[in-house]
Image (cartoon, rainbow, N blue to C red):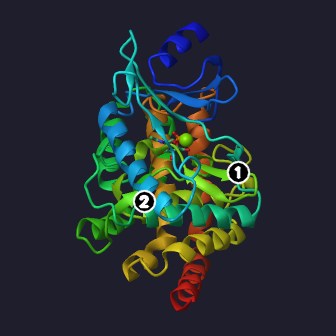
Amino acid sequence: MEQKLREIASSFALEGRVTAIDSLGEGFINDTFIVRTEAGAPDYILQRKNQYVFPDVPAMMDNIRRVTEHIRRGVIAAGGDPRREVMTVVPAKDGRLYHIDGDGQYWAVSVFIDDTTAYNKADSPELARKGGEGIGKFQAQLADFTEPLAETIKGFHNIRHRFVQWDEALARDAAGRKKELAEEIGWIESRRTGMLDFWSKVEDGTIPTRVTHNDTKINNILFDKQGEVLCAIDLDTVMNSPSLNDFGDAIRSYANMGDEDDRDLSRVGISLEMFRAYTDGYLSQRAKQLTDAETDHLAFSARYITYEQVLRFLMDYIDGDTYYKIKYPDHNLVRTHAQYRLLQSMEGHYDQMCRIVAKTADKYRKA
Ligand code: GN1
Ligand code: MG
C-alpha cells in the first residue's frame, strides 16, 4: 500500500523528499493520509476522495481552490499568516487540482499545517466559544464571495430533497431492515411537516443563502496550541446554502454531552453551557451581519440539522450501509439512536436555547 501511495504522492508538486506516508483521521467519507517529508519541507495531507459521495471531484476541487484563494487574499490584507490561516491546495504536476490513479480513483493534496490540534470532542466551553468564533470568521471571510459555487452534493442540507431520497430508500428496502424499524421511521415521519415548513422559508428567500462550510463538526476545525482557531479544513462541502446549517451542525457536535454514536444514551443530550459558549463565539463575529430571520432560526437550525442527521444515518442503515464508513454491523443504527436522543433533548430545551440566542444577539448588536 505504501508503495502505491508514494507513487500517487509523486504525481503532485511536493517540496522535499517523501519519508513516510501514514493513515490519518476519523473522516466517515474520504481516506486520509499524512505524507511526511524531510526536514525543511512541509508535510502534506493526501486524500482519496470518495467518488460515490462526490460525483464531480474536479468541480469540488475548483470550489475549494476559489474559496481558499479568496480567504488567502483576505488573510494577507489583514496581515495574517496565509500558510496557517487558510488551507492550501497543492496541484498535481500536470496543473490539475487532483490526480486520477490507475483504478480511476481521485486523489488530492493540501499542505499539512503543523503545531496544531484537532479535537473530536469539545471538552470545555472555552473551546466551544473559540470554535464558534472560528466558523463566524470563516463565514465573514466569505461574505463578499459572490460567484456561485458548484453544488457538489445535490440537496445536501435540503430536507425536501432528503425526503425524496428517504421515500425511495423505504420503497427499495434494499437490506430488508424496514420491518424492524417502525419506531425509528415514526420519529422521522412525525416531524416531516415541521421540517418542510422551516425549509420553505429558505426556498421563498425569507432565509438567505450564503457561502457555507456545511460540515462544521469540531474535527473539521484546526486550533493552534494556544487554543485559537486557525482555519476550517475539510472544505469538500463548501457550497451555497443557509448560514444556519453551519451553526446547527456545529451545535450537534460541540454541545452534545455524549458521542455521536454513543451506546449509552444516558450520556447524550444538549449541554446548554456549551450551547451558550458556541453561540457567544459565533455571534461575536456575525450578530451584526445576520438578518432577523437568520437570528430567529439559529436555535431551530440545531434541531433541523440533528434531525437531518438522524434521517441520514437511518436511511443509510435501511440502504445497507452504503454511504458512511461503519466500524461494526449496526453502527448506523446506534448513530441513529444517539442522534435521536440528542434531538429530543434539544426539543426539550428549545425555549432556553431561543432565549440564549436572543440575549447573545442583543449583546453583540449593541456592542
Ligand atoms: C461526514 O466527512 P466527515 O466525517 O467530516 C458527512 C457529514 C456528516 C458527518 C457525520 C460529505 O463528515 O455530512 O454530518 O459525516 N460528510 C458528508 O458525522 O456527507
Ligand atoms: Mg472531516
In this view of the protein, can residue 344 be seen by the observer?
A: no
As drawn, is 267 to the left or to the right of 150? right
Whichever of callouts 1 and 2 sits on the residue coming sooner in the sequence is 1
Question: Could you tell me which quadrant the C terminus lies in?
Answer: bottom right
Distance (Cα) linking label 1 and label 2? 30 Å
Q: Nearer the viewer, residue 130 or 334?
A: 130
Residue 331 location in percent, x, y? 60, 34
Dot 2 falls on a residue whose secondary structure is loop
In the image shown, does 97 or 131 lie closer to the viewer? 97
Q: Residue at x 65, y 24 (%)?
A: 36
What secondary structure is marked by label 1? Answer: loop
What residue would you read off at disc 2?
190
Going by the numbered disc 1, the residue's amino acid type is Lys
Mark 1 is surrounded, within 10 Å at the Cα level, by few (under 14), some (14 to 19) or many (20 or more) other residues, namely some
Look at label 2 and name its amino acid: Ser
Residue 44 - label:
none
Q: Quadrant of ligand 2?
A: top right
For marks 1 and 2, give the one nearer the viewer. 1
Where residue 284 sits, quadrant-wise, is bottom right
Residue 121's mark? 1
Residue 55's x, y, as percent? 31, 31
Q: Can you give x and y, in whole percent of width and height, for residue 278 in the image? A: 63, 68
Q: Quadrant of residue 263?
A: top right
Residue drawn at 41 percent across, 30 percent down: 91
